[in-house]
Image (cartoon, rainbow, N blue to C red):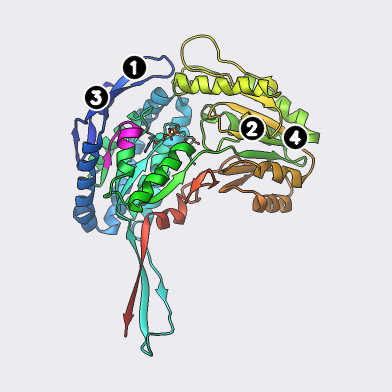
Amino acid sequence: MTSTLASAAELYLDGGWTAGGGTFTTANPTTGETLAEVAAADAADVDRAVEAAARALRGEWAATPPSAKGALLHTLAGLVERDVETLARLEAQDMGVPLGIAQGLFVPNLIASLRYYAGWADKINGDLLATDGYFGAPTHSYTRREPIGVIAAIVPWNAPLMILGWKLAPALATGNTVIVKPPEDASLSILHLARLVDEAGFPAGTVQVLPGLGEVAGEALTLHPGVHKVSFTGSTEVGRRILRNSATHFTRTTLELGGKSPQIIFDDADLESAVRGAAMGLFTNQGRVCAAGTRILVHRSVADAMLDGLTQAAEAQVLGDPLAPETTMGPLVNAAQRDRVLGYLHRGLDEGATLVAGGAAPDGPGHFVAPTVFAGGNDITISREEIFGPVGTVITFDDDAEAIALANDNRYGLAATVWTSDVRRAHAVAAALEAGAVGVNGWSPLAPQLPWGGLKASGIGRELGHEGILANTESKTVTVVL
Ligand code: NAD
């Protein structure tokens, strides 16, 4: 572990490790103790990285054949497989996710993205297009899908490696170069990944990792004329700022932002699996999931059963050290985030919600908040705003139309879950929901084949699947007059 943390104080830039303009410290949210000193890139570091990325884009990376790009992605996937334990422990220590989730979900998801897009690397095709000809002459027209160029990947702390995989793998498969800005609250796992990139043998400048502060390194990337695309995952507020910055140089931008996702439980649902799934949607990673199903819309006839089930699920959570095997819920990432979540708990009570489970921060060190369930309406603050903690509201409805109206009555539109045994109802409701992804009888299925992204304040654009290829390429139309 010591050797893993040793390079945290350096940037991975142009194929080597180098000091940045400054440093900052990252803390262990379980103990509050300093974990590591981390390099902080400044605007001059960003300039150097963009120059190196541009060189690789025109040079060695451009000259790397598509199948060799795919092979490099497979090599990187193999190295991540070798180091699953190290990477998972770093995330558990740095941002508090239980080790089993990092090991069993987050890192395997990164591996799956790398392998899926490794397969795409030599299958990037345009179209052959028929036209009516050009002043009587026939034409041969086609589209090419070309790399966009230098891509800045800006990543949040709630699942750094998994979310980076959604950006890095399709960007590299399509021939772009990538500058990664890890989150300041959890840079360590991505810095270890940079070592694996180096070991895999990617040409210098193809992938660079610049930890640092959002308002310094992140801001410099989004305003840099040499950055051709920003792929951002994070809060809606920062996403809005990035979109404004992107207007400066018409930088292509995808935004994966916040959510307030509904889980709709109909009266014909298998209640046992609905309780299990709804609890998973509420409590996984302490509720710090963009797709967290925090508005639990329940048919009135099954509301008591769902409340009982969710209460039991909340009480069954084991809070503690994320590295301990029995822990199902670790701390929140820092004191500010814990206090923010506690503020929402007070707000819920002030606005008339009924506390059903949890509702407080346990005594002792670490930034813990008890898993919390309220019963209340869709209009109160805790039902409208993203809390990013283990807090949900159970809201009742009487018919399908009301369930759909409640689900759509929110500024976010990322994901939704429907629990029903009626297949016609499942498809009809899925079609009516304002969400980028709908899961039926399963909370938030994630796979590299499935496009991911949001409507409304949840963002712009899609990642993953074939849409991830389109989002990382420009289309060029070529017409030859014959
Ligand atoms: P955040 O917006 O505070 O930070 C995200 C990243 O942006 C960090 O790397 C940060 O350093 C950087 N940043 C901050 N200010 C910046 C600026 N001015 N310019 C450029 N970059 C800047 O978000 P967070 O607190 O790290 O993450 C939580 C948020 O992420 C939640 O809202 C959550 O819903 C969202 N999220 C969305 C998805 C999705 O797929 N839609 C997935 C995970 C998380």
Quadrant (top left/top right/bottom left/bottom right) for the N terminus: top left
Residue 6 is labelled as 3
* Residue visible at 36% across and 58% down in the picture: 473
Residue wearing tag 4: 396
Q: Residue furthest top?
A: 364
**Residue type at mark 2?**
Ser
Q: Answer yes or no: do the residues labelled 4 and 3 have beta carbons within 8 Å?
A: no
**Mark 4: few, some, or many residues within 10 Å (few <14, many ≥20)?**
many
Mark 1 Cβ inside 8 Å of ligand 1: no
Mark 4 Cβ inside 8 Å of ligand 1: no
Mark 1: secondary structure:
strand
Q: Earlier in the sequence, mark 3 or mark 2?
A: 3
Within the displayed image, which quadrant is ligand 1 positioned in? top left
Mark 4: secondary structure:
strand
Q: How many marks?
A: 4
Q: Answer yes or no: do the residues labelled 1 and 2 have beta carbons within 8 Å?
A: no
Q: Nearer the viewer, mark 4 or mark 3?
A: 4
CA gap between label 4 and label 1 equals 45 Å
Q: Earlier in the sequence, mark 4 or mark 3?
A: 3
Residue wearing tag 1: 34
Mark 3: secondary structure:
helix
CA gap between label 4 and label 2 equals 13 Å
**Residue type at mark 3?**
Ala
CA gap between label 4 and label 3 equals 52 Å
Residue wearing tag 2: 383
